[in-house]
Amino acid sequence: MSPNPSDEEQESDCGSNVSSPAITEWWKSELIYQIYPRSFKDSSGNGVGDIAGITESLEYFEWLGIKAIWLSPVYKSPMIDFGYDICDFRQVDPLFGTNADLKKLVTELHNRGMYLIMDLVPNHTSDQHPWFEQSKRKQGKYADYYIWADGKPCSDDQLPPEPPNNWESVFGGSAWTWCAERHQFYLHQFLKEQPDLNYRNADVKSEMEQVLQFWLEFGVDGFRVDAVIYLVEDKEFRDNPLVGRKRRASGTEDCRLTTKGSHTEPKYNVDQPETYEIVQSWTELMKKFGLNHKKTIFCVTEGYSDVEHVMRYYSAGVSFPFNFGLLNWTAETTADELAKIILEWQEHKPTGGWSNWVLGNHDKKRLATRLGGSRFTNMANTLLLLLPGTATCYYGDELGMEDADIPFEKGRDSYGLRAGPERFKEVSRDPCRSPVAWISELPHYGFTKADCDPWLPHGKNAKQESIDKQRNDHQSHLCYFRRLIQLRSSAVFSESSDNFQLVPCPSQTVFAFTRFKTGSPTYVIVLNLDRSSETVCADLSAVDDHISEAEMVLDSNNHYKPGESMNLKRLMLNETQALVLRFQPSAQR
């Protein structure tokens, strides 16, 4: 393996077989790239990204070395919550195209040896879903498809009465809304337009299994299961405990939750024992399908909860539950705090459990913004891609995209808009969802046609963040990201999520760890978290008592040359710099 993987164009790994790639646990070695379809590429000229735009862009992923893409929801929806309020689980929303467009994407991906992961949103539907329309009217089997409850008894005949309990919605306010037509409250853990399904109803379970089966037969290679912790609620609807606002264990409070002041600690509306049984029934269905079709179906769960509850999803058969610890990495995070975030996952995961890491998503400030600017991008991505396990990259983070400054007047996020002008910028998720800049010199940077405004404005640095500009610059964030992908394809990085060791360092601003494999060189990954312009001298002699020097492989700042010999006792690091070094362990010499 070359210490400096080339940025030259590579031939695509195409084949004529349109079926999924050969059966393998592909998700262990592949980077997962999250696409927010609205913001990726518009092919139709209406200002909104679509499925055909993604298909047109597959060459980008081939060049970059990405083989697994995950689509945020593209199902038919009123779009109150941008597709997470679904009114037809089997149809693509016309905004994004058609089922035929999606089928073409699946075929083109499989032709290239690539994989498609879809969002499964099982906790709730849109309030415009036919199931809910019939449930409101108590029609047939649909009467019990959702969580309905009477209000609290009151002394007079006031309507509506008080909600059944004090449960809060993720987006603030009561999780209960009165339905005048049915004379009962319905539960919605998210927006009132997203009523929760009742998973104690066998018909509901069957419905979702049929949805899964439909998409498996369609050719989807895996699922990201949304909001799993909310699937089942306490039968007795007991009140949640009242607590002051605080972050939950491990920083795993739902990043969408922004309720101010006193609030309730989620207890009886999350993490119920039956949840894991339901998830296991889905993973068993996926496994059975995979065995029958000689392919591996990937499954990851999304749930912001404490580490003990999250780890239980491993035993439910998922590939892994999402690890959101690094979403709390900010400009103030120290090397010791970063180590605690990483070790918490590594030390709690079960034997044989596969690790994973996430630095950004569609609900959180972009990593470059959280860390203090795009200059931190290469350092952050070095950590993401070289930690043990699977990495998930949010679209644009490979380019150093920062949050766009979007005023209330141009806002689209219903949650942000409902908060009003004063709180819009505090809670809106629009800034991290701005469109990709494809071509620096074109109107709208090539995202959409010249005569159409994008659904959200680009950020102020879009020209510098553009793909064409960065592909032609060997020292860009994008080209560095590509070299990281090439490096992580080696066995040392891809064959285990346990071959990891922190390296003690006297400097309080330096974070370092090793990746190793018997018979292979040991790699040392070093990050300088110091924000001053002064050079930091790091002593990494603890790596190996008998090794004093290591070979330079990658430098995020492009200061050192590949192959250069580096003194491990006096390693000079500049601001925001990350280094990848390697050496032959003394025991193997």
Image (spheres, rainbow, N blue to C red):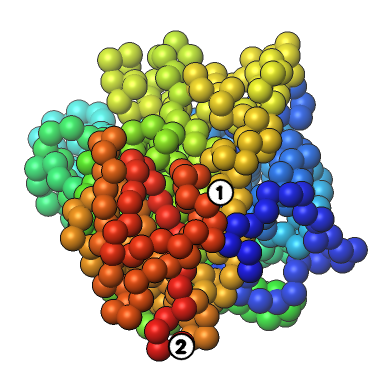
Question: Disc 1 residue type?
Answer: Phe
Identified at 49% across, 36% down, the residue is: 400
- Residue 565 seen in the current view: yes
The residue that label 1 is drawn on is 481
Residue pictured at 54% horizontal, 71% vertical: 494
Mark 2, Cα crowd under 10 Å, few <14 / some 14-19 / many 20+, is few
State the residue lying farthest toward the right. Answer: 16
Q: Is residue 342 in view?
A: no
Point out residue 283 in the picture as x, y percentages from the top left corner: 54, 72
Within 10 Å of disc 1 (Cα), the crowding (few <14, some 14-19, many 20+) is: many
Q: Secondary structure at mark 1?
A: helix
Q: Where in the figure is residue 398, as x and y percent of width and height?
A: 54, 43
Q: Which residue lies at the image location 63% right of the left edge and 68% below the top edge?
A: 1
Q: Secondary structure at mark 2?
A: helix
Q: Where 280 falls versus 40 (above or below)?
A: below
Residue 556: x %, y % from top left: 47, 47
Image position of 487 (left or right of 450): left
Of 579 and 568, which appears nearest the observer? 568
Q: Nearest the camera: 374 or 449? A: 374
In the rendered image, which residue does mark 2 sit on?
588
Q: Nearer the viewer, residue 312 or 15?
A: 15
Q: Quadrant of residue 335?
A: bottom left
List x then y, in percent, for residue 81. 48, 34
The answer to which of 319 and 420 lies nearer the viewer is 319
| Apparent side of residue 72 relative to residue 145 in the rendered image (left or right) | right
Residue 571, image quadrant = bottom left
> How far is disc 1 from disc 2 in space, using C-alphas?
31 Å
Contact, CB < 8 Å: mark 1 with mark 2? Answer: no
